[in-house]
Image (cartoon, grey):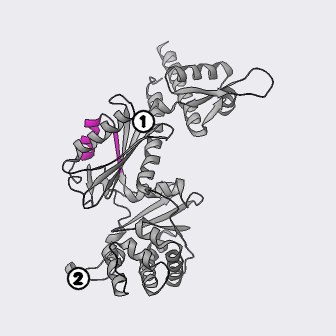
Amino acid sequence: MTRLAGSSKLLRAMNESATLALLLDRGTLTRGDLRDLTGLSKPTTSEVMRRLTDAGLAVVAGHTSGGPGPSAEIYAANPAAGHAIAISVREARHPHLAAVLCDLAGAEVARADVTVAGDPVPAVTALVDDLSRRAGLPPGSVRLVQLGLPGSYDPAAGVIRHIDVPGWDRPGLVADLATRLGATVAADNDVNLAAIAERHHGVAGAVESFALVWFSGGLGLAIDLGGTLLRGARGGAGEIGYVPVGLGRGADRTDLTDLVGGPAVLALAASHGIEAPTPEAAVAAGAGGGAFLDALAERIAYGLAAVAAVLDPPLIVLAGDVGRAGGEALATRVTAALHATTPLDTAIAVTGVTGDPVLLGAQVAAQRALREQIIATLREAAPAA
């Protein structure tokens, strides 16, 4: 009898999690829609929806109208059933955090942008508390925090590598944040998150795979293979700026950053008579054409040739402040230079994401992880058969 009871509870949890997943994916569904999609009987579907609504995971969003017979209830996942926060950690003279609190449906509930200094743990904790308070949520309501980092997180070692923001390279930082917040804390590279934003809101939605190259003060590469990001054994996949471009060693060593990193772009612009305060300003000033943009495109194509030759992606996206500032003028020149360098007919496009791509990608990742967490909680609540 115990085995039968356990099996019954497990089956019930599976039905609930499958139904909630459909509501999250499809938006709104009637019980008839759910029966057709799940294959469950009419009584079982009604019981599943009763349990989901009683648990606050689903709500009645409306009623059908215009057809014969009584109207049917239309169900949706309850947006207030869970909340997550996306945080972009930004490098600057004064490091700061840009954050968005969103609900289960992905809708923005509150937003903040704060300057930070010193230990990140109290700074992030205060930010989460402030957003929760402004959203009218009780303490501890945030279930998940997604960090976007200008570095790479090695989960096995519990350390953030290649990051220049003070305090963020301390071993155990992410675990300490999770303990202090009482929430799941996920961490990912900022360029990876920009690629997630490009996949969902930019020019890469229709391609099977793509590479996104980030040109700003520094360089970065994100590799999307069929919708899955390649992160590497220690979270360091995509640190393309460290790729050597010569045979020198020590002080004589040059890498791709020395060719197309921020300081290199400014120096190249100055050599063509363009003085600007930032790399993106220099590229914007030269976006009308001329020798500077041609020379920059040649350098960029040199780096992209390795990406194209190794990965052979159908699309490479130029992103970051410099990529966006160059626009179609830069993309056209990079395309010509790349095709003159390699026989591969790789398409080049400018990012289609507007606003902050890192924060937007972190929002997408946070919402997706929150949904998976809630669905997994339903499954885990049932005993094994």
Q: Establish if 374 lies above or below 158.
A: above
At x 53% / y 53%, what residue is drawn?
200
> Magenta segment, which residues?
173-187
Q: Establish if 137 lies above or below 93.
A: above
Q: Position of residue 232 (x, y in %)?
A: 37, 58
Q: Nearer the viewer, residue 169 or 269?
A: 269
Picture quadrant where residue 112 is located: top left
At x 20% / y 80%, what residue is drawn?
251
Picture quadrant where residue 203 is located: bottom right
Please name the residue that numbered disc 2 is placed on: 252
Please name the residue that numbered disc 1 is placed on: 83
Q: Nearer the viewer, residue 180 or 315?
A: 180
Q: Position of residue 100 (x, y in %)?
A: 40, 44
Q: Establish if 362 lies above or below 291.
A: above
Total marks shown come to 2
Q: CA distance from mark 2 to mark 1?
A: 50 Å
